[in-house]
Image (cartoon, helix red, strand yellow):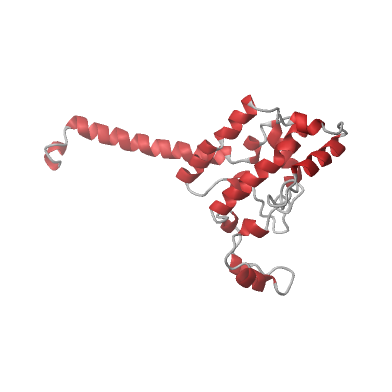
Amino acid sequence: MKINDLLPSFITRHVLFALIFGGISGIAFILFLIEFDHYTSTEEFCTSCHSMELAAEPYRNSAHYKPKSGVRASCGDCHVSEGVLSATWDHFMGSKDLYKQLFGHDYDDPVINALHLPEAAFEARKWFKKRDSATCKKCHVKVAIYGDRPDTLQIHLEDAKDKTCIECHYNLVHRIIPDEKTFKRDKWNAMIEEEFGLQKGSAKKLLK
């Protein structure tokens, strides 16, 4: 008995070949995406841009990098969604940052980087809130957060019942940025000018 006798008449040898080839290609593509997402979510890849190395410096002194438990959260653990398709989409959307890096301001300059940091932080917080802090919840379970204070669990279950993680927990890993509602650009510019020994008013010019 030939294999053609086991298949419907409309599935010819060419159709069968196309199905097999397409299936193998699909599997290979998914495996490629998994490896691609894994590599592009690493600290090594992210910090290959000097501007991201500036963001990584405070991260390496945070509890996410130096946890008591020994479980370290890398860049992708926090900033990339779970699932190969969602992760690939996040990387695709992140290409706008690469475009800005190549054709925008000189973000490798620590001064320029610091001046633009608040807007980047606000966008990241919106990203977390929109996704209900899903990447946070990969590691942190609200009903299991007991903390050092006796009322920590109660706070999370009652006071923060309808809130998502990022609404209360930010400025944990990177440079401290005020809440967007209270952020004052003039004060931030003055602070950066003083930090880097710049002439008063020069920060506004650098932002153009």
Residue at the (45%, 43%) spot, across then down: 85
Residue at the (75%, 29%) spot, across then down: 206
Relative to residue 111, is residue 6 depicted above or below?
below
- Picture coordinates of residue 71, whole percent (x, y): 66, 54
Residue at the (74%, 69%) spot, across then down: 148
Relative to residue 55, is residue 182 depicted above or below?
below
Rendering quarter of residue 160: bottom right
- Picture coordinates of residue 83, whole percent (x, y): 48, 48
Rendering quarter of residue 197: top right
Where the N terminus falls, by quadrant? top left
From the viewer's side, name the closer residue of 6 and 169: 169
From the viewer's side, name the closer residue of 2 and 152: 152
From the viewer's side, name the closer residue of 130 and 11: 130
Total residue callouts: 0
Work out which residue is located at the far top of the displayed protein and give it.
Answer: 103
- Picture coordinates of residue 10, whole percent (x, y): 13, 36
Q: State left or right for residue 179 relative to residue 138.
A: right
Where the C terminus falls, by quadrant? top right
- Picture coordinates of residue 174, whole percent (x, y): 72, 46
Residue at the (15%, 41%) spot, across then down: 7
